[in-house]
Amino acid sequence: MKIMNSNLGYPRIGAEREWKKALEAYWEGRINLNVLHAEMKRIRLSNLKMQQNSGIDLIPVSDFTYYDHMLDMAQMFDIVPSRFRTAGKEEEIYFAMARGTEEAVACEMTKWFNTNYHYIVPELSDTVPTLVRNRPLEAYREAKTELGIEGKPVIVGPYTFVKLSKHYGNRSFADWVRQFVPLYARILQELEAEGVRWVQLDEPCLVMDIPAEDMELITDVYEQLHQAAPQLHLLLQTYFEGIEHYEQVVSLPVQGIGLDFVHGYETNRANLTRWSFPQDKWLFAGIIDGRNVWAADQEQKCNLLSELLQYVTSSRLSIQPSCSLLHVPVRVSQEETLDPVIKESLAFAEEKLSEVVQLGEILQKGGQIAPLEARRQLAKSPLRNRADVQQDMAQLLSREPMRSTPFVKRAVLQQEYFGFQLLPTTTIGSFPQSSEVRQARRDWRQGKLTEEAYRTFIRRKIEEWIGIQEQLQLDVFVHGEFERTDMVEFFGEKLDGIAFTQNGWVQSYGSRCVKPPLIYGDVAFVKLMTVEEVAFANTLTDKPVKGMLTGPVTILNWSFVRDDIPREQVCYQIAAALRREVTALEEAGIDVIQVDEPALREGLPLKRKRWTAYLDWAVRSFLLTTSHVKDTTQIHTHMCYSEFHDMIDAISQLDADVISIETSRSHGELIQAFEDRIYDKGIGLGVYDIHSPRIPTVTEMAHMIERALRVLSPRQLWVNPDCGLKTRSKEEVVAALESMVEAACLVRGRF
Ligand code: GLN
Ligand code: ZN
């Protein structure tokens, strides 16, 4: 008997990002809707065919989308906020919800669990949801008629769908879930009538710390869904962690349970051992890592499968990736510039499907495990292992990193040294990356501009903006980051142990894709990364110029990370490398150094009980980077979000002299957080939203400052924008900063 295999979702973007290109061409009016539909269909079918050719038994359908799968669900249920109703035809409304229009602001977008994928948040208002089309059915029919595929429709389950939505009006959460049950029931009935065998209901929220009483609701809901379509095989799919309330979840009236044995290994395995697995259900075992890019170790995976076979018979086991392959790039084979040992050690979506199929074959035929030669080579290779880094680490970690003088004393010394006025003004780092800047970089990369000419160009930009900052009379200057593309890529290219692919794109949100660096080996400092530009800027002014680095946790969280050593070790290595850059900046006379950690929060584990461990090593990494500086060197950090209430202790432990945070879009919620807790260090609450071209008035900004002063002392408050200014125009930046400085002046005058 053949062991079944399955897939949960496939990247939409295409090996050459055709999907992105088609969408953007449509938005820019270069192709019409018919052409877009045709191109989307071509991509969709080619993705399905790819999976068919790999030998996947249960191929997901309706995981494909024109923007985001949560948005698809919302539109299918007619959850369209009234501000979009006049946007036009179905497709226009769809894209308007995602991207906004002149008249209507887009729906909110937020992170899909702890991934770097962002979904559009459905807005549940007092309107009654209705089923306006059965998307899963359409997708099933298409796959069947076009390719003869017996597809497995994928739907976000009712509990997770409502949990991830925004709720308005006064209906309770449970009421909302119940509202959707008849709609889901109809979808399932129609699928059953069509002869569909398996349907995948994604319920990743079951891995979160959900209240026990929700299990009653979930049981009731699934009871009704089962009764609506009793012939249909429902697969309750979870991923990203082990499930909570295992005993109840596996007793739900469904035929299959999908568990993640990569990212939820510990919890799921402990539960299996304790409670076993119901004999009448299928176990869909996620064993190939859908979140990372390394080829699987077959031996280890076979051991895992043998372990699972103690709990289910092989006729009720399905092998699959741990989650949708949406989170990894499409294909390794087209990479041309990677070191062969690294390349052979990788598996993207296409390769992962082969791994799934191969594992099933090995298990069936018994034995014949092919050890992955490349991975073995990489494990031993000097590419991966650097004795100097390992020695350094051992020495650095032999004692807790911390600043030698506590903040209260440092603050006095720093104030004597810098002599800042009250409410000092500064910016977050980047100034406009104008088309001129991007063109120069492109020319230089293509060899059209010499190294020397490019450096001169960058210096001219720095001079221009130092001049602007003098005129604006800011208190702490920045050099403007003109030499940087992306804040992680820039450092990744200069550190050892990190590689870049040519085509390793992953969807981040909508048509936007990112190409995360690959941390394949011990990370090492090999050359100065930022000193030249910052030190140059520093020669042009008497004002302090802030050195600007991306922090270790952010570099880690925005990369694909080697999986042979714990993440925290990798983070410490990055921190140790950045520490040397900090030393070099200090030696070059830079006495304010900002280490950005916008991704600190993103790395928080899904389960609360794991937060402390993560924050502990994240904080230690930051301190490894920054804590060895002189008392009078002022360490700044920056974060782009405002949810601080639940991690304010960790933020405080970073022991940064000044932290700047996005505030203006959170409507003061953040300020509230400071009311209850004592935060005594320097803090810059962003006084204006840099994402919007709108420039707030002096009064508005002064008001923001005053509101902050209700809970913070004027000694500790800094005045700055929400984030870097690289996406804005020069005119916008100058006008906004002028008003910002004036607002600070105005408030200062009242003391
Ligand atoms: N220093 C960076 C900038 O100003 C910070 C970017 C960020 O917070 N994401 O662009
Ligand atoms: Zn930011």
Image: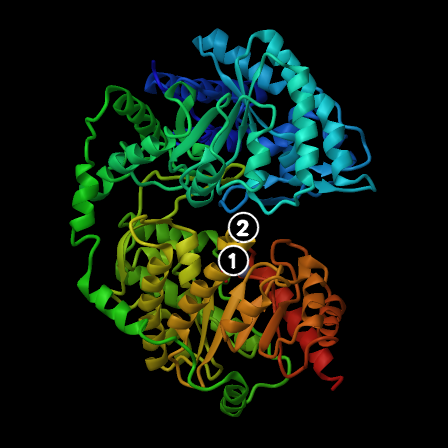
Task: Judge whether 178 appears above or below 49 on screen.
Answer: below
Residue at the (60%, 74%) spot, across then down: 683
* Left or right, 645 with reference to 266: right
The circle on residue 81 is: none
Query: Looking at the image, which residue is at 38% across and 60% down?
Result: 483
Of residues 671 and 34, the one nearer the viewer is: 671
Specify whether 297 is left or right of 241.
left
Quadrant showing the C terminus: bottom right
Q: Is residue 374 visible?
A: yes
Q: Which residue is mark 2?
A: 607
In percent of width and height, residue 37 lies at 54, 20
Residue at the spot of label 1: 611
- Kindly tell me whether residue 101 is visible in this rendering: no
Relative vertical location of residue 616 with respect to residue 712 in this rendering, above or below: above
Label 2 with label 1: CB-CB less than 8 Å: yes
Is disc 1 placed on a helix, strand or loop?
helix
- Mark 1 beta carbon near ligand 2 (under 8 Å): no
Three-letter code, disc 2: Lys
User: In this figure, which colouring scheme has been used for the structure?
Assistant: rainbow
Give the residue drawn at x 61%, y 19%: 135
Disc 2 is placed on an element classified as loop
Q: Residues within 10 Å of mark 1 (few under 14, many from 20)?
A: some
The amino acid type found where label 1 is placed reads Trp
- Give the Cα distance between marks 2 and 1: 7 Å
Is 316 or 696 nearer to us in this picture?
Answer: 316
